[in-house]
Amino acid sequence: MKKISNEDSWAGVLRDAGFRLTMPRRAVIRVLSEHREGLAPEDIRRLGRETHPSLGLVTVYRTLELFENLGIVRRIHLPGRRHCFCAGRDDTHFAVCSRCGRVTEFPCPGTPGLYGHVRTETGYAPTGHILEVSGVCPVCARGREGCG
Amino acid sequence: MKKISNEDSWAGVLRDAGFRLTMPRRAVIRVLSEHREGLAPEDIRRLGRETHPSLGLVTVYRTLELFENLGIVRRIHLPGRRHCFCAGRDDTHFAVCSRCGRVTEFPCPGTPGLYGHVRTETGYAPTGHILEVSGVCPVCARGREGCG
DNA sequence: ATATCTGCAAATTATTTGCATCGTG
DNA sequence: CACGATGCAAATAATTTGCAGATAT
């Protein structure tokens, strides 16, 4: 019994939402599926051209925006200024390796405690949150050569 | 006994770190002290010109970078793409009002639980984190006119 | 006095838009 | 076939750099 791959599952999300499964989108899906680190739009275009040589940067931007809206790609807010993107559902969070840039998803530790804390401290009624943890990934912690 | 104002305290940080307290920097400090919402560099320049008419956008960028490095100003990563800046120490977090954009600092709810969770789930050794909570601020929750 | 800081103009980088064409459903 | 999607070129927005002159200490 074949396990449904990440790529197949994304294709399903696209179709279910009424969007077409085109070659450029396939290329972007493949790139994001095969990489575990945050990628800038320009990186995605370059890597995507390995399988779809005519892939344009504009299409990458549009595809990322679409995938972000569909909840299957996440924008990463690195300490610096450039936005990166990564495969990931929008109910999870990311750990970002400060050595190699690898990104790993982890489930939300739970909001009740946090939201109660915020309500007490600020009076706000919380509705959502962004959480990113930076640290050293297992590969970098073990070997000296890192994982990049 | 006069309470040390935010502005005086910032001036102290600057001097202690060996930087000069110039008019443009005073202007930026004043703007950030007087506003409780995230401001884009362009906003800061416009508001800063009320007291220092020759304030340039480039200087605003450089000042924000300096203040961020000194740990007295924080970059806010809004859902969209534009970076905003806000007064705040770097050991706190922000609640951002989704209605009026007001930003309120709150103390970190504590990292041990979170970091243990991340370690278990990902194997990463956490060293820091970004946390932003979105919600409705008390002013917007009460009146209909919001606070903007 | 003098090294830091500033502001302008211009360069660079990031992102969006217009439009003719292409390709999926 | 029809409409959504693409890619290019160009427009716009965001940020950085070079440098001559101003200014805090």
Image: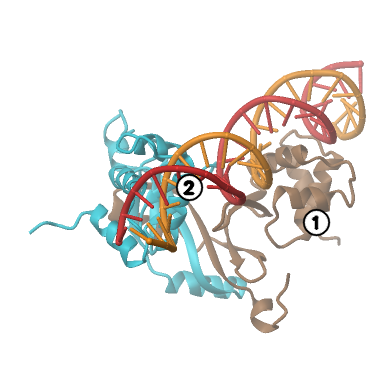
Chain colours: A brown, B cyan, C orange, D red
Seen from the viewer's position, the closer of residues A65 and C7 is C7
Q: Nearer the viewer, residue B26 or A125?
A: B26
The amino acid pointed to by label 2 is Tyr
The residue type indicated by label 1 comes to Ile
Give me the disc on residue B61: 2
How many marks on residues?
Answer: 2
The answer to whether one can see residue A70 in this image is no
The location of residue A1, given as percent across then percent down, is 86, 62
Mark 1 vs mark 2: give the one in front. 2
- The chain letter under disc 1 is A
Residue A110, image x, y percentages: 47, 61
Q: Chain of mark 2?
A: B
Number of residues whose C-alpha sits closer than 10 Å to that of mark 2, classed few (under 14), some (14–19) or many (20 or more): some
Quarter of the image that includes the C terminus of chain B: top left
In this rendering, is residue A142 above or below B120?
below
User: Label 1: how many residues lie within 10 Å, few (<14), some (14-19) or many (20+)?
Assistant: few
Callout 2: SS? helix
Residue A4 numbered mark, or none: 1
What percent of the width, then of the height, locates residue B82?
Answer: 53, 42
What's the residue at 47%, 51% (across, down)? B62
- Between A4 and B27, the one lying in front of the other is B27
Q: Quadrant of the N terminus of chain B?
A: bottom left
Q: Indicate left or right for C11 with B1 as reference.
A: right
Q: Is residue A116 above or below residue A60?
A: below
